[in-house]
Image (spheres, helix red, strand yellow):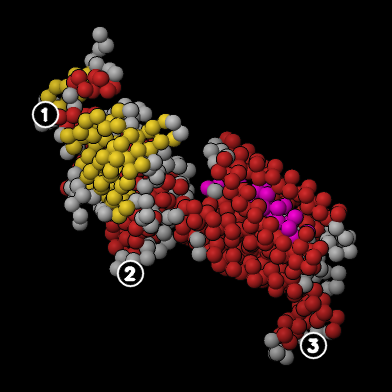
Amino acid sequence: MPETAVLADSLTYRIGDAVLVSEVDFEATPGSLIAVIGPNGAGKSTLLNLLAGNLQPSEGQVLLNGIDLSTALPGDLALARSMLTQRAPVDIPFTAAQVVAMGRFPYRRDDTNTSERDAEVVAEAMDRTDTTEFAARIYATLSGGERTRVSLARVLAQDTPIVLLDEPTTALDVAHEERVMRQTVQLSRRQRAVIVVLHDLNAAAVHADQIVLMSGGAIVARGRPRQVLEESLLSDVYQQPMVVVDHPFRDCPLVLTAEAP
Amino acid sequence: MTDSPGLVASTDPYVSRRRWFIPVVALLLLATAWAALSLGAVSVPSGEVLGVLAGKIGVDAFDEPSRQAEAVVWGIRMPRLLLAFAVGATLGLVGGVLQGLLRNDLADPHLLGIGPGAAIGAAIGSAAGGVQGAIAGGVTAGVITAFVVRRLSRRASIDPTMIILSGVALGAALAAWVGFVVFAADRSTVPPIEFWLLGSLTGSTWRALGTAFVFLLGSSIVMLSSAHLLDVMGLGEADARHLGIDVDLVLTVLLIAAGVAVGATVGAVGVIAFVGLLVPFVVRRVTGPSHRSLLFGALASGALFVAAADLVARLLIQPVEIPVGLVTAAVGGPVFLWLLTRRRDA
């Protein structure tokens, strides 16, 4: 495995005159969990979509496990990175188990990959995401949070070295948010490079190895949670007074909003 | 998905329904075939029908058929039955593919305008080269129209009902052009407008069957082999890409196949509406959404539907034959309406 799983060099993405992402350098190593945070419209999702190969950068290039995105074949890409999207269709007529099994699609033509192996991976992914109980239910009939967990199981079943998650916890209750974040941590412990866009600053503070703070399409800070989650910086970027204290039980910062003066 | 054991197979709610589907459809196909070969203005007893068929494979069995029975069964009814099967199977299949591709259970090749578009090419082609010219022209125009539909569906992709609405508008405009071509052409070589727009299997020939069959077989193989891709594309374009599907390539290839398939049917028998809408809709209740069973089911059921509709078209007001597209529309129209209103409720 190459030392750098994700390497992006001077990425810029423009639509007309609007610059959505501006000269972003980005690097992720196997085994790291990087949280991308920032206000609405900061370019977090655009950056993730550039890293996934869903958008072609106006300038710059992306290497995923050494594969150049601009020339990569879709099949090779699917073995290198998986992604959880924010706005997937909800009217999917398949059962939860069938949806998760689609995560094995990229492996279909591989002789060493038997259907028993597929079944094992699918069962394990559903177990990890706590979705086995509704394996037989139709995806379209699940609640928003249940659908997110099933989609996450599908991403786990794809079993790629690079995992991109776009706001995986948005529709979840606190218990499942915690579970999903713990799964994300475990993914990185299994030597995956995990990049996750988060709105919940405290989820980022608790779980991420590294935080990337974006604003106006550019990265304004990156580093360990204690380095990035800093009162004046956050207050400035979010245009909202913020207070950062020590978490009473965990070894990380705790971010709170303050009253406007 | 059907090839993974364990959790996935055990949670498939359609397994037991699929089991009785094949024998039931097979029986109904046989019954329809018997009726199509035996019944009509000239009634041919079953024994003689079997005698004709046995004679064709060199077996001397059953009743010795009369010359008239042989001419009617083999010369007229057999090519008509087989063409009905081939056309119906293809239209059912195309409907299933388009519905999967556009993620829209209202998609139908003719409602989207592909049929009327193909009919323009087919009418022009028939002026130049009879039924073979019609099929060639239909295939060409069918592929072109399929790509026009693709552009339209890109624009309207937010609202599935809009895609159908724009297809209906496109179809109406194209149907008018079929009329212009037909009325400008020589009446003795080009079939009349009701043939093109309402469809008819009257006068089906072995030649028409043979020519159409080449195109129908080729395009159907392409469409059937896309079943697994269509399942994954059900997750939406973005996730299909994440799983390694070249969405644009699949869309292009399948639209060409659909255009070829629809064009060949229109060249041979005109526009038979609603088959592509109705058949996958009904079959999906039985096979579930998995495209491997859905597409094969739509193939078999489409054949059954058009052959049965043609029987009704032939026998309903004897000795007058009504266009088969009227029969399919009489059944399909109300279902389409019901689907539209249900969509609004959702």
Relative to residue A240, is residue A81 depicted above or below?
below
Neighbor class of circle 3 (other Cα within 10 Å; few <14, some 14-19, many 20+) is some
Q: Is residue B157 in the magenta section? A: no
Residue B29, above or below B340: below
Q: The residue under label 3 is which amino acid type? A: Glu
Q: Position of residue A158 (x, y in %)?
A: 32, 54
B219 or B128: nearer the viewer: B128
Which chain's residue wears label 2?
A
Subunit bearing disc 1: A
Read off the residue under disc 2: A111
- Determine whether, in the image, residue B7 is placed left or right of residue B116: left
Decide if residue B210 is in sight here: yes
Q: Where is residue B72 drawn, in percent x and y?
A: 82, 76
Q: Please report whichever mark, 2 or 1, sits nearer to the chain's N-terminal start.
A: 2
The amino acid at mark 1 is: Phe
What's the magenta region?
B103-123
Query: Pointer 3: what residue?
Result: B64
Label 3 sits on a secondary structure element that is loop
Label 1 environment density (alpha carbons within 10 Å; few <14, some 14–19, many ≥20)? few
Label 1 sits on residue = A249
Which mark is on residue A113? none
Q: CA distance from mark 2 to mark 3?
A: 56 Å
Which residue is painted at 81% across and 51% down in the image?
B179
A107 in relation to B151, above or below: below
